[in-house]
Amino acid sequence: MSGRTTRRRRQAARLGEIMAAAYLTRRGFRVVARNVHSRYGEIDLVCRGPGDGPPWVFVEVRTYRSARFGRPELSLTPQKIHRLRRLAAHYLAALGRPGDPFRLDAVTIYWPPTGEPPQVQHWPGIG
């Protein structure tokens, strides 16, 4: 993969995370952290959930510009979900809140190659 392709992919991912945060904020979520790194990997968005749901929502953002590899939500494998659970638990433990309930969500952003506006979908409770 060329440096230009990698750079474009990173830019698309960054823009996807911005779009996902804006989308969730419009729906009552409060984004409290972005791109949280630990030894287990990275959490794209950490949110406080609206309403009666769990107070913490950890969000994986998937951004795609092509359907060549299938829809973005299909890339959320059981292994990835397990790793996200571990990341969430580690994050809460680091805050001194290891018993707080949480939920894992995904937001997928798909840019059709036809130039149409991106399609944003929220997938609550992915695992």
Image: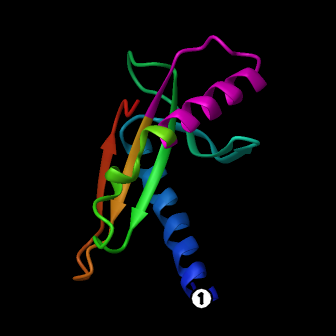
Residue at 46% from the left image edge and 52% from the top image edge: 61
Q: Which residue is mark 1?
A: 2
Q: Quadrant of the C terminus?
A: top left
The magenta region covers 80-104
Magenta-drawn stretch contains 105: no
Q: Nearer the viewer, residue 97 or 117?
A: 97
Query: Magenta segment, principal secondary structure?
Result: helix
Q: Secondary structure at mark 1?
A: loop
Residue extending farthest front = 79
- Across and down, in percent, residue 7 comes to 60, 80
- The image shows a total of numbered marks equal to 1
Q: Which x, y percent locates residue 92? A: 68, 24
Rendered position, 65 above or below 82: below
Is 85 drawn above or below residue 55 in the view shown? below
Q: Position of residue 121 (x, y in %)?
A: 29, 50
- Front residue of this view, candidates 77 and 49: 77
Left or right of 114: which side holds 107?
A: right
Q: Residue at x 33, y 44 (%)?
A: 122
Membership of 86 in magenta stretch: yes
Residue drawn at (48%, 37%), measured in percent from left and top? 81
Farthest residue toward the top? 99
Task: State which quadrant residue 19 falls in.
Answer: bottom left
Above or below — where is 25 with respect to 67? above
In this orientation, which residue lies closer to the viewer: 85 or 111? 85
Q: Quadrant of the N terminus?
A: bottom right
Give the percent coordinates (x, y) of residue 89: 64, 25
Residue 29 falls left or right of residue 85: left
Query: Which of these two is toward me, 94 or 31?
Result: 94
The answer to whether 104 is drawn above or below residue 70 in the figure is above
Please name the amino acid that badge 1 sits on.
Ser
